[in-house]
Image (cartoon, rainbow, N blue to C red):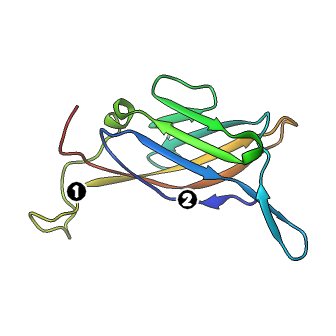
Amino acid sequence: MAAQEEDFTAQQNTTFREQLTMETTSGDPPVSTPQDLTGCTALMMIRTAYNAPKPVVTLSTTPTADTSIVLGGTTGTIDLFISASAMQSIYVPLTQSPAAEPGADTPPSATYVYDLILTFPSGDSECACYGTFTVSASVTHL
């Protein structure tokens, strides 16, 4: 399974939920089927940069009140969850970019990086997906 590039966009102070489906391709002609994730664990870290010492948010198959990853076994699904309170803690600078004009409809945002690593029952690990995680500022503060 090759890692997929998936870029996410979320808003500060709101719940983030996303579902991915992992697939494998085999045969001639090629046929895609869901990747069996039974018995797997997953870990996803969002960081300010690839070499940042601490993650901004961590999700795993060991859920917390604020984050979780739920794997769908034979359906190949990966459900990501970050609570509104955890999203509130993600820093977004409240200044417009130099290109934005006053009154522009585009709110300030911050772009982070992430990857999601699956560990299979065999002990093998591989990157399921990676990309950017962009968070837009929220006008309403919880």
Residue 61, image quadrant: top right
Tell me if residue 95 comes above or below residue 100 in the rendering.
above
Q: Mark 1 packing: few (<14 Cα in 10 Å), some, or many (20+)? A: some
Q: Is residue 50 shown to the viewer in this render?
A: no
Q: Is residue 116 shown to the viewer in this render?
A: yes
Which residue lies most toward the front here?
75
> Given the image, on which type of amino acid does mark 2 rest?
Glu
Which percent across, then down, holds residue 138?
23, 45
Res. 85 mark: none
Compare marks 1 and 2 and give the one earlier in the sequence.
Answer: 2
**In what element is the residue under mark 2?**
loop
Q: Pick the residue in front: 56 or 116.
A: 116
Res. 6 mark: 2
Tell me if residue 64 comes above or below residue 93 in the rendering.
above
Residue visible at 22% across and 62% down in the picture: 106
Which percent across, then down, holds residue 42?
67, 37
Residue visible at 67% across and 44% down in the picture: 117
Q: Pick the residue in front: 131 or 38.
A: 38
Residue 78, image quadrant: top right
Q: Are marks 1 and 2 in contact (CB under 8 Å)?
A: no
Residue visible at 77% across and 51% down in the picture: 35
Which percent across, then down, holds residue 141?
20, 36
Q: Pick the residue in front: 11 or 47.
A: 11
Quadrant where the image shows the N terminus: bottom right
Q: CA distance from mark 1 to mark 2?
A: 22 Å
Q: Mark 2 packing: few (<14 Cα in 10 Å), some, or many (20+)? A: some
Which residue lies most toward the right here?
28
Q: Which residue is mark 1?
A: 107
> Given the image, on which type of amino acid does mark 1 rest?
Pro
